[in-house]
Image: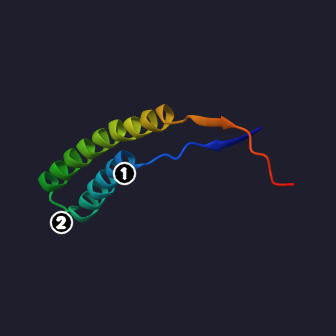
Amino acid sequence: MSLRPKEIKFEEEIKLLNEIYNDMLEAVHAKPDTNNIEELNVYLGNVYGILNRTIYRVKDIKNQLEKDKQYIHETWNAPA
């Protein structure tokens, strides 16, 4: 008996990963160039929010992948 994974489409997971990627890019590019404490404080607050969103998105991706983890159980007989 061979186990072949069911064909799974990852559109939702890819969408969530793209959102995480865009948030990370935004956080990197939004870093203030100055040593102004107020600007750094706002930046750190924004980064905290991004990390918080990322945690929930990663958990959603994990749950969706685990839900889709189904296999088709069938036998395959090679031609003689």
What's the residue type where badge 1 is placed?
Answer: Leu
Is there a contact, CB below 8 Å, between mark 2 and mark 1? no
Q: Is residue 9 left or right of residue 42?
A: right
Residue at the spot x=49%, y=36% of the render?
68
Residue at the spot x=61%, y=37% of the render?
72
* Tag shown at residue 34: 2
Read off the residue under disc 1.
17
Please tell me which residue lies in front, 32 or 77. Answer: 77
Percent across and percent down for residue 65 are 47, 38
Residue at the spot x=23%, y=42% of the render?
49
Q: Residue 61 is drawn in which quadrant?
A: top left
Percent across and percent down for residue 38 are 12, 52
Percent across and percent down for residue 75 are 74, 39
2 or 1: tag closer to the N-terminus:
1
Please tell me which residue lies in front, 30 or 19. Answer: 19
What's the residue type where badge 2 is placed?
Answer: Thr
Q: In this view, does 37 lie to the left or right of 4?
A: left
Q: Is mark 1 on a helix, strand or loop?
A: helix
Percent across and percent down for residue 57 are 34, 40
Residue at the spot x=27%, y=54% of the render?
23
